[in-house]
Image: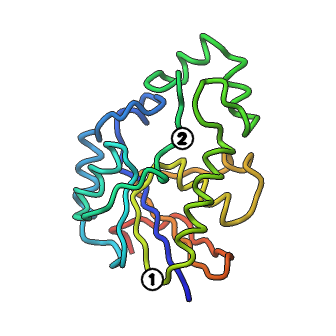
Amino acid sequence: MTTRVTLISPAAGDAQREVRFDDDAPLSDAGLRRVRAVAGDLPAADRTLVSPSVRCRRTAGELGISAETVTELAGCGMGDWRGRTLAEVAEADPTAVSDWLSDPGFAGHGGESLRELCDRVGRWLDGVAGVSGRVLAVVEPDVVRAAAVCALRVPPDAFWRMDVPPLTATELSGRDGRWNLALGWTPGRP
């Protein structure tokens, strides 16, 4: 029994341009244009899911996907940093930013550590691995990174070694607890 999971990162919003810890801001005008241009170019799926963020739900809607919101696929909880820019946080507490970037267990912002995010996404992957078919999910880029960390069974500090551009797809296929990873195809491009 093979499970295929296609993870689509959402279209760009102002939070990415501003390097802001997500504050549930909407998609940018450019992001909306781009997502509308690729609507209809996704594989069929047995189950369609979406992260609870405004950005992911709007991207799914613009793609024409009617999806179930799944809290386990939420982006990393950033606690006190939510809504602030990286520059603002770095100016206020450069040591905390350094610790966050170097220690997967860091949760000094009062939210979730990257290790906790990876564990949460890993449990979700374990759950979907037991059901054959195709899953399509629009999720935050950090969820895509966490899924790749889990699929490859690499240490959580590998999280920062992966870039996930807006509106790209990452596919996991697997069975018996082993995943293969296909990276970075873009909907609407051959």
Q: Residues within 10 Å of mark 2 (few under 14, many from 20)?
A: many
For this rendering, which residue is in front, 77 or 29?
77
Residue type, numbered disc 2: Cys
Residue 32: percent from left, percent from top: 24, 48
Q: Position of residue 77 (x, y in %)?
A: 52, 36
Q: Residue at x 37, y 62 (%)?
A: 49
Q: Is residue 100 left or right of residue 64?
A: right
Please, is residue 153 above or below residue 157 in the view? below
Label 1 CA crowd tier, 10 Å (few <14, some 14–19, many 20+): some
Q: Earlier in the sequence, mark 2 or mark 1?
A: 2
- Residue receiving disc 1: 133
Q: Judge left or right: residue 132 versus residue 58.
A: right
For label 2, the SS is: loop
Quadrant holding the C terminus: bottom left
What is the x, y in percent for residue 9?
43, 55
The answer to which of 50 and 172 lies nearer the viewer is 50
Q: Which mark is residue 3?
A: none
Q: Amino acid at mark 1?
A: Gly
Q: Residue at x 26, y 61 (%)?
A: 63
User: In the displayed structure, does residue 41 sit left or right of residue 176?
Assistant: left
> Which residue carries the number 2 mark?
76
Quadrant of the image occupied by residue 153: bottom right
> Residue 168 occupies which quadrant of the picture?
bottom left
Left or right for 125, reference 108: left
Residue located at (35% from left, 55% from top): 69
- Classify 77 as above or below 73: above
